Structures are given as structure tokens and as C-alpha cells.
Amino acid sequence: MQPLTQRHRLRSIIGGSAGNLVEWYDWYAYSAFSLYFAQAFFPSGDRTLEQLNSAAVFAVGFVMRPIGAWVMGIYADRHGRKAGLTLSVTLMCLGSMMIALTPGYAQIGNAAPVILVLARLLQGLSVGGEYGASATYLSEMAGRDRRGFYSSFQYVTLISGQLVALCVLLVLQRLMPASALEQWGWRIPFAIGGVLAVAVFYIRRGLAETQSFHNAQAEGAPKSSAWALFRIYPRQALMVMALTAGGTLAFYAYSTYMQKFLVNTAGFGRETATAITAAALFVYMLLQPVAGALSDRIGRKPLMVAFGIFGAALTWPIFTTLESVRSPYAAFLLVLAALIIVTGYTSINAVVKAEMFPAHIRALGVALPYALANAMFGGTAEYVALWFKREGMERGFYVYVTAMILVSLIAYLRMRDTRRHSLILED
């Protein structure tokens, strides 16, 4: 393989990032539009119960993420990062089109939520493989001195996918009456996602493979497997789970759940809550490369420790203040403050994990421990929050988030700075 020029390296990073954006748009469209389609799949007349059911299906998708991480992480380690990325977007396309085309409960009864669950399982399988493949691809494609900066685009595109989903929601809210959105308009974003996934499939087929993968293949490295991961690299795998637990819970609490919190607890209208969330996420997205570039100068560990300290100290005050805030501008500043805090984790978590593992098992090492922690803490965040609310103990969720951030803070304090001890050997 000929060494990549900076131009080809940048083209590959942009191509991989664009596909990642579409993958996460499809994933987050479910959360963004659940306020409208929950009643179509789970009719009950109790809005909180409908949201609880849709949040449960959202969590079910996370159950498949460890399986996707396991199967597709091995696939990307053995057949290439490019092959893994192409397969993941194919599965996401199928899941999105199933949601877009499935009739509601009124038409097909219990088959509707069953098909919804199957679609989310497919999407969970896709995203489980996507994270490891894309995080590994971007980290390996980036040069040594700018690895934090370029790998931060993994979360830039992740946030962009969520932001695009919210923007589609805002546009449809302006163009369609709420009744039309609840009846059929919610299908539009899933159809858009399916079509975009087809385009990304062709983009990803043209990506260059990484030098790290080619070197591992040429050296005859051992084959990737879950047994090898936890037998040979147990410390790294457990460290990935520990540093992910608080970070992923905080991210989902501050982002996807926050939209529901602003409606159900703070009392904002659905359109206002969507606008607040979208504006805060836009600023947050712009901060990721800044923090990633900072990690290239001062190291990864200081940023993660800063998230742990400020997240543990300020989660309770931010949520309790939001309970009674009435100004959308004040709410925006509080939501943004929470997202700025979690930037210390999100901007560099991909490269930190990639730098812990050798190339022959890197995609699996990044994906599987992360997916396990994400399924336990990230995917259940909305469900746990809504359960606490339904039981009349809403503030228990704030304590739960704070406690898990403290657990991750211990891991951050004990870990080595991967910038100085990276196992990505190619420049």
C-alpha cells in the first residue's frame, strides 16, 4: 500500500465522517420523533406511559449494540475497517425503512410494536459495529500530531446526526400541524434516513483502507476474537467500560433525555424544547474539534478528569435549576453548560480507546467494551429517568448520573495518558 498523502488522508476522514453522520441521524431520529409516534405504536392515553414504552424500545436497541460490536468488530479487524463501515450502513438502512413503512397499532395491532422492536434491533446491530469501525478508522487515518483533532469528528458527526434529526423535526413542526405529524408525518425522517444510507453505502465502497490494518495483515497477527480480547487485554477492556459508564450516561442525560425533560418537567412546549436542544447541540458540536485539538497539546487525561470533576459537582444543580426555569434563554445556557462539561469525554473518547489496543484487535477492543457499558448505562438513561419520574422520585435520577460520573472519574485518575502511550504506531 502506498503511503497516503495529506489530501487523501483528509478525503478519507471526510468520507468516513459523512457516513457516520447518516448512521447517527437514523439512530437519533427515533428519539427526536418519539414525542409524536409513541401514540401510534403504544396507544394508552397516558403520555408518560407512552413515552416510557418508546424509551423501553430505545433501550432494547442498545441490547443489540454489544452483539453488533462483537460480530462487526471482529469483521472489521479481519476484513478491514472499510468493509465494516459498509456493512453497518446497510443494516441501518434496513432498520430505518422498516420504521418508515410499518403500519400503526390501529391497523395491525400488536404486530406494530413487534416490528418496531425488530427494526431497532437491526439499528442497534448497525450502530454497535459502526462505533468501533468508525472510531478505529478515524484514529488510524489521522496523523500522530493531530489524532485527537481528527478523531473528534467521530462525535462531531454523531452530534450532527442528532442535530439534523432535530432540525428535520423543527422544519416539519413549522410546515405541518401537530395532528398530521402524529398521524403520518413522523414517517418522513425515517424515509429520508433510509435514502441517505443508500448514498453512503456507495461513498464507503470508495474509501481507502488504513495502513494499520494492512500492516497487521502483513505481519500475520493473531485473529481478533472476544476470547482473545478479554484473555489478553482484560485491563484495557475493563478500563474502556469504566471510563465509558459515566460519560455515556451523562451524554444521553444531557442530550436525548433533555428534550423530554424540558417538556415533561420544565413545562416548555414541544417546539420550544426542540429549539433549545438543537441550539445547545449546535454549539456543543463546534466544541468537539477544539477540545480534540487541545488534547493533542496537553494530553487526553486532563480533559477526561475535568469532565469527571465538573460533571459530578454540577449535574444536580443544573437539573434542579432547570425544573423551575421559565426563560428559554436561561434553559439554553443551562443545557449548554451541561454539554460543555461532557465535552471532556465525548471529544476524545474514541481516540483514547483506539490508542489502548494493537491494530489486529483494535476495532473489537474499541467497540465491545464500549457497547457493553453503553447498553447498561447510555441506552437505559431515558427509561431510568422516566421511571424515577413516574415513581415520584425524579431527583433520584440526578443522583444516579452523579454517582456514575464519579465511578468514571476514578478510572480517569488511574489511567495512563494514551497520547504518550499510544499503540497506534503508524503516523
Image: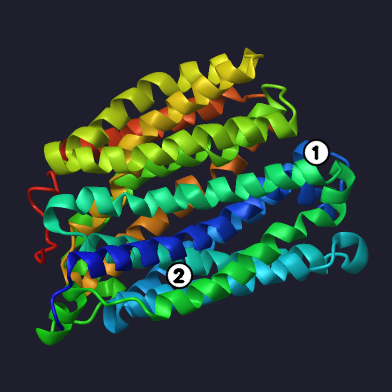
Quarter of the image with the C terminus is bottom left
For label 2, the residue is 68
Frontmost residue, 171 versus 418: 171
**Where residue 411 sits: x, y (%)?**
24, 40
Q: Element type at marker 1?
A: helix
Circles 2 and 1, Cβ within 8 Å, touching? The answer is no
In the displayed structure image, the side of residue 216 where residue 16 appears, left or right = right
Frontmost residue, 325 versus 48: 325
Q: Which amino acid lies under the numbered mark 2 shown in the image of this protein?
A: Gly
The quarter holding residue 268 reads top right
For label 1, the residue is 47
**Would you place residue 300 above or below residue 118 in this image?**
above
- Residue 194 can be seen, yes or no: yes
User: For the residue carrying disc 1, how many other residues have a C-alpha within 10 Å: few (<14), some (14-19), or many (20+)?
Assistant: some
Q: Which amino acid lies under the numbered mark 1 shown in the image of this protein?
A: Arg
Quarter of the image with the N terminus is bottom left
In the displayed structure image, the side of residue 68 where residue 360 appears, left or right = left
Residue furthest to the right in view is 106
**Where residue 179 sits: x, y (%)?**
89, 45
